[in-house]
Image: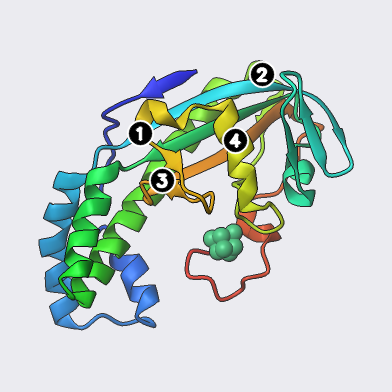
Amino acid sequence: MKVLEKIKLDIPEDIGKDFLTKLMGGMLIPKMEEMLEEKKEICLKSISPKAVYDSFEILEIKGDIVHFRNGSSFNGPNVSKILKGSEVASIFICTLGADVDNEIKKVSESGDSLSTIIMDAITTSILGLLGEYMGKLIRKEGLRQSNWSSTCSYSPGQYKWTIEEQKILFSMVDGSKIGVKLNESFLMLPFKSISGVYGFGYEANIDKTRVACDLCPREDCIGRR
Ligand code: SF4
């Protein structure tokens, strides 16, 4: 199991602007642009990006169930579709840390809804960058042979993979190494965290789904890629 602390992310000047613009229906008022700048500093001071990940051999996939050699299994039509043809799966958890959750909670409890929305847009965008950073790293490390390729990532809670399966994922990769745990609804705490799985195997066999959004029916989702 690998643990990464103090991950350095390349954060653009206008982080959060695209997300917030989509959220606001395509336009930002000047006040919001000013607040983006102001809140960015607070968010950047509060984040501490970390990750933990490991790889596991896939024994077989029968129907919707992915059986790992270590005895664990994932169950779902989309996760089994994505991992079909993979020899190995890399499972990861990454987080921006608890401090940023606390900052947003403090602002929210003060009743300042606009600042809360803006800080949420900024940190959701930074979390997206952390996910991309981890994707690049995991994909680079996971290709064991030149004729191997990787799948897109998939996460518990995405379409047709129940959030309860976070429990299996967390039994395979120890989120506590980076301070991430599950609450009674199987949501990750801190909230600004992502978990998921990538498959690796022979290019000819690997699932070619471009991104998880291609399997998702939420056409109007602002996170759609
Ligand atoms: S469309 Fe939205 S909800 Fe569906 S997988 Fe993509 S980001 Fe997630």
Most foreground residue, 176 or 113: 176
> Which tag, 2 or 1, sits closer to the chain's start?
2
Q: Quadrant of residue 72?
A: top right
Please tell me whether residue 111 is drawn above or below residue 186 in the rendered image: below
Rounded to the nearest angstrom, the CA distance separating label 2 from label 4 is: 28 Å
Q: Pointer 2: what residue?
A: 146
* Residue 201 at x, y percent in the picture: 73, 26
- The residue identified by callout 4 is 169
Observer-side mark, 3 or 2, equals 3
In the picture as drawn, the residue positioned furthest to the front comes out as: 184
Label number found at residue 193: 3
Choose mark 2 or mark 4, whichever is in front.
Answer: 4
For label 1, the residue is 179
- The x, y position of residue 199, in whole percent, is 67, 33
Question: The residue under label 4 is which amino acid type?
Answer: Leu
The spot of residue 203 in percent (x, y) is 75, 30
- The tag earlier along the polypeptide, 4 or 3, is 4
Q: Quadrant of the C terminus?
A: bottom right
Q: CA distance from mark 4 to mark 3?
A: 14 Å
